[in-house]
Image (cartoon, rainbow, N blue to C red):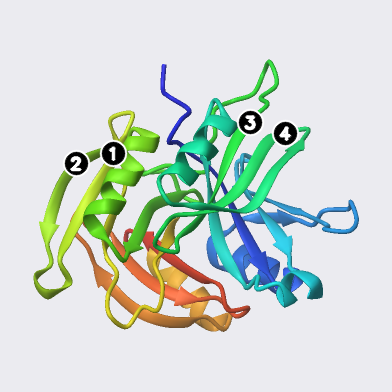
Amino acid sequence: MDKLLGSWIWYELMTKDAAGAKAFYEATIGWTIAPGNEPPLFYGHIARADGRQVGGVLPLSEDMLAQGAHPMWVGYIGTDDLDATLAQVIARGGRALMPRMDIAEGSFAMVMDPWGASFYLMQPNPGPDAAPSVAFSPTEAQSVGWNELYTGDFDAALAFYTEIFGWEPAGSMDMGSFGTYQFLAHNGVTIGAMMPKPPHVPMGGWNHYIRAADFDAAHQAAVAGGANVLHGPVEVPGGDWIINALDPQGAAFAIVGQKLV
């Protein structure tokens, strides 16, 4: 059985303009984003074309913005014991940005690693008929297909994530002056990679690559929708193409996919 600990099980977009984000990502990725109807957060849900959910949309209130929140994508890493994993994160120099919260779907907490990368921990409460999460898939369109970490301390961060989540180094690539691009695997599947934070990047962080069914179409839709492309398009090993960009609301995101022509 696959281990829940260390699995990417959900992705959340924090945004100042939920309606604008809905229009942008539906046109770019082909998702359906259903707005929530429970005040005060009106949390929306992101579904693929097959109806399977992969994430949520959290509108940022003025109070959240005043406390330092900003538009961004944040991933959820699964655990079977939230309190124990949270304690490990803190013991290894991380900190809790948001304490444990309990909802019908499970318990979660938002944390930051010692080098500034934010993510959630979540212990889900799956129902008896719950299917495994498809939020991450290395091959399926409209899921996140790659998770990439920029970090200020490569060796310490590698130890932090492998010791807490059981991730395994899965080969590496020498990027010259940019350092080592270290691939990471979980349950025998390569889930992403980590690398030293480039000098022009102000803070370490996770970058999540959304897989598109048609890379060119998604790229064109993103630009037409107002995205600011920061890097790419560029081909990466394996035949995929990528872009790194800011969405119109200012959240960093990335697209990965194959060109169909």
Callout 1: SS: strand
Mark 3: few/some/many CA within 10 Å (<14, 14-19, 20+): many
Residue corresponding to mark 1: 185
The amino acid type, in three-letter code, at marker 4 is Glu
Q: Which mark is residue 105?
A: 4
Instruction: Tell me which numbered mark, 3 or 4, is placed earlier along the sequence.
Output: 4
Q: Residue at x 27, y 44 (%)?
A: 159
Q: Which residue is mark 2?
A: 170
Q: Are marks 3 and 1 in contact (CB under 8 Å)?
A: no
Q: First in sequence: mark 1 or mark 4?
A: 4
| Marks 3 and 4 close (CB-CB < 8 Å) | yes
Quarter of the picture containing the N terminus is top left
Q: Position of residue 155 (x, y in %)?
A: 22, 53
Mark earlier in primary sequence (1, 2): 2
For residue 133, the mark is none
Q: CA distance from mark 2 to mark 3?
A: 27 Å
Q: CA distance from mark 4 to mark 2?
A: 32 Å
